[in-house]
Image (cartoon, helix red, strand yellow):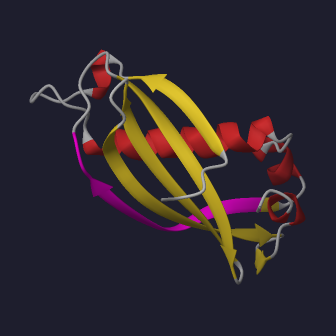
Amino acid sequence: MANYIFSLEMEVRDYECDLQGIVNNANYQHYTEHTRHEFLRAHGVSFAELHTRGIDAVVARMQLQFKTPLRSADRFVSRLALRKEGIKYVFQQDIFRLPDERPVLKSTVEAVCLVDGKLSDCEELNRLVP
C-alpha cells in the first residue's frame, strides 16, 4: 500500500463516458494530471510560475492499470504518493470509487524537470518529497 500524501475527490461528468457508458480510458490521465496539479497548488507551487522561470516538469513515463470502470456521476478519490529516484519524481497515483473504495486505477507517473531546457533537479519539487 502506498503512503499517500494527497487526496482529491471528483465526480465523473457525462461527456467523459464513451458509448459503453464507462469513462473513456484517456480521461483517467486527465484525472491523474489534475490531481498532480492540485497537489502542487496545495503546496504553493504554481506550474505557470515555474514555467515563467524556465522550469518545466514533464511526464517522462506513465504506466496505467485499469481495475474497475467508472460510470457517469460516480464519485471517486484520486490519491497520490511521491518519491524521488535519481533525477525522476515518481508519483504513485491510484483512484478508488466512492463510497466503496473499490480500486479503479493503479498508476505510476515518472516526471522529470527541465531547467532552461536542460534535465535538472527542481528544488520546488524536492521540498515536496517526504
Q: Nearer the viewer, residue 106 or 27?
A: 106
- Give the quarter of the image for residue 119: bottom right
Residue 105: image location, x then y, percent: 34, 48
Residue 100: image location, x then y, percent: 32, 29
Rendered residue at 58%/40% (across/down)? 35
Residue 40 belongs to the span the image colors magenta: no
Left or right: where does residue 51 sit relative to residue 97? Answer: right
- Give the quarter of the image for residue 115: bottom right
Residue 54: image location, x then y, percent: 85, 60
- For the C terminus, the quadrant is bottom right
Residue 116: image location, x then y, percent: 84, 70
Residue 62 belongs to the span the image colors magenta: yes
Q: Over which residues does the magenta segment extend?
A: 56-68
Number of marks in the rendered image: 0
Rendered residue at 65%/60% (across/down)? 82
Left or right: where does residue 107 sit relative to residue 38? Answer: left
Question: Compared to 11, does 91 lie above or below?
Answer: below
- Give the quarter of the image for residue 40: top right
Q: Nearer the viewer, residue 61 or 83?
A: 83
Question: Compared to 6, does 17 lie above or below?
Answer: above
Magenta: main secondary structure equals strand
Rendered residue at 35%/59% (across/down)? 64
